[in-house]
Amino acid sequence: MNRHKIIYLFSLIITVFAVAPVYGQHVIGVKGGYGSSTARFYPKQETHSIWGGYTGGITWRYYTAQRYVGAIGAELEFIQRGFSFEPNSLEEGKRYTRHINSLIMPIVWQPHFYIADMRLRAFIDLAVTFSYNMSSTYTNDLSGTGGNYPFKTVRDNRWGYGLAGGGGIAYLAGRLEFNVSARYYFGYSDILRNRNKYMDNASDDSGQNPFASTPLRSPLDNIYITFGVGIRLGKEKEFKSFEPLRQFREQRRLKAIEREFRKAESQDGQQGSTGSTLAPINTQQSK
């Protein structure tokens, strides 16, 4: 049911923005990538980044005609997150590791500018994120246990939120866009509930939760490099109406050349008329 709520919210956001002026441009795409994740515990723990996480999902952007405002948009991604740390400093190398499968929805603002004769778009991503943790697995080297990690209300948070930032570059080829980007997800919510609010969430004998007492703070951080492709939507007239910057620059360049040519013709004509009036005077003087 919770997954359906996320998908419904994403669909609602797209519907709301779809009534924007027709002279903007909607871009629908897909993306996929690879990266790492970790957690920030307080009190501090000796943590290690987990590499090898995958992400993938669908994206939507709305580019306004005023290019300096940037784009707004939303995404719905599957993302692999997690953390790894050493619960006992006396037993070096023995770690507790969690892998978490999440759905995440970034609401994005994307300032950008064009280069290479409007063929490339360089952009910055700034986003607020909302997430839902679907499932998780764990490995505990100290207890020799592992497997599926059951979420418990008094111990675990399924819902989360945070910020994200990054940047990238897109290549524009007709209606298609190919892009590569990097993004850092900075968590604000905790994956584990604060022990001051839930006292019955300390470690257990199963090895699922290795903390002697649950951390006061436990947000998740992730960094991913992604590749994507999108298609620009709209009627042909609307599509051409957004393209214009390249065409406008070309027309302005041609008009500048035409003005210079006419100016040169005018100057040549003035010189020719001056020469014709001077010639008879010289003739009369010679007589």
Image (spheres, rainbow, N blue to C red):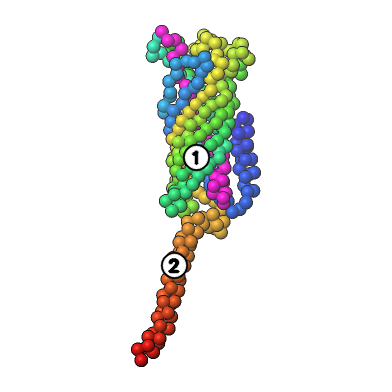
Above or below for 208 versus 13: above
Q: Residue flagged by tag 1: what amino acid is it? A: Ile
Under circle 1, the secondary element is: strand
Q: Residue flagged by tag 2: what amino acid is it? A: Glu
- Main SS category, magenta section: strand
Residue 26 shows in the view: no
Residue that numbered label 1 is attached to: 124
Nearer to me, 164 or 175? 164
Q: Residue at x 41, y 28 (%)?
A: 52
Nearer to me, 103 or 19? 19
- On the image, which quarter does residue 109 sit in? top right
Specify the segment rendered in magenta.
61-90
Q: CA distance from mark 2 to mark 1?
A: 39 Å
Q: Residue at x 40, y 81 (%)?
A: 275
Q: Is residue 13 magenta?
A: no
Among all residues in the image, which is located at the extreme bottom?
287
Q: Quadrant of the C terminus?
A: bottom left
Residue that numbered label 2 is attached to: 260
Q: Residue at x 52, y 16 (%)?
A: 42
Nearer to me, 194 or 94? 194
Give how far across and how far down residue 130 sits, in percent. Answer: 58, 31
